[in-house]
Image (tube, rainbow, N blue to C red):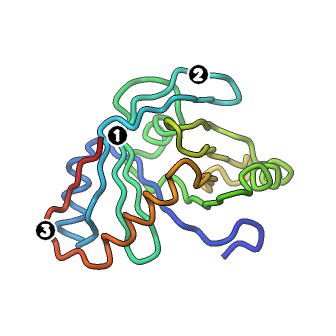
Amino acid sequence: MSIFLGGVRQVGYVVRDIEKAMAHWSGVLGVGPWFYKEDVGTTEFRYQGRESRPPKLSIALANSGDLQIELIQQRDDAPSLYLDSLSRAGECAQHIAFWTLDRFDEFTARLLERGYVEGHGGRMGLRGRFAYFVHPELPSAMIEISEMKGGKGEYFAEIRKASETWDGTAPIRPRT
């Protein structure tokens, strides 16, 4: 647990084939069910401090206990840390995320004061903001701050609850 940001709530993986990754996590590892959005509809996006074309992203979410697993596949060539990570390291665990309902600006300021820089950030529809931070001394320690507003917190609670009684059926649950 971070004394500054609370507990890590999510580990995010960048993947090249999200359907294959969901099948592996659910069938081989027994983690699910996966709540899958083929196009999350990123509406605002910044990359390296500048307004940027939002990437077209597919995202799948599932829980393993209290920890949420996120699978991310970018389906275009818009500049992003997702593509940067794939280029540098291939498919990998890309970030950990801390969640907040009302301390997004405080958490962001705390990271910036400690030498982190925002690699990319934005918003998906009406849901809360998100921002990914990197530090020049430890670039592999990518941190996401995710704001739980606009129904995001309730959606994540639904995913957590579904995992508690999941019996392996309906491993992929598409969302619109």
Q: Residue at x 68, y 54 (%)?
A: 138
Residue furthest to the left in view is 169
Q: Residue at x 24, y 56 (%)?
A: 22
Q: Earlier in the sequence, mark 1 or mark 3?
A: 1
Element marked by disc 2: loop
Q: Nearer the viewer, mark 3 or mark 2?
A: 3
Q: Residues within 10 Å of mark 2 (few under 14, many from 20)?
A: some
Q: Secondary structure at mark 1?
A: strand
Percent across and percent down for residue 84 are 51, 36
The residue under label 2 is 52
Q: Nearer the viewer, residue 165 or 3?
A: 165
Q: Looking at the rendering, which quadrant does residue 3 occupy?
A: bottom right
Badge 2 or badge 1: first in the primary sequence:
2
- Identify the mark at residue 169; answer none if there is no mark: 3
Q: Residue at x 57, y 29 (%)?
A: 44
- Whether 125 is drawn above or below 159: the answer is above
CA separation in Å, label 1 and label 3: 22 Å
Q: Is residue 144 above or below residue 30?
A: above
Q: How many angstroms separate mark 3 from mark 2 (CA)?
A: 39 Å
Check whether the beta carbons of the residues at disc 2 and disc 1 lie within 8 A of each other: no
Q: CA distance from mark 2 to mark 1?
A: 18 Å
Q: Amino acid at mark 3?
A: Thr
The residue that label 1 is drawn on is: 58
- Give the percent coordinates (x, y) of residue 172: 20, 56
Labels 3 and 2: the sequence-earlier one = 2
Residue 149 location, x and y as percent? 59, 51
How many C-alpha atoms fall within 10 Å of the one at disc 3: few (<14), some, or many (≥20)? few
Q: Quadrant of residue 25?
A: bottom left
Q: Amino acid at mark 1?
A: Ser
Q: Is residue 6 above or below residue 108?
A: below
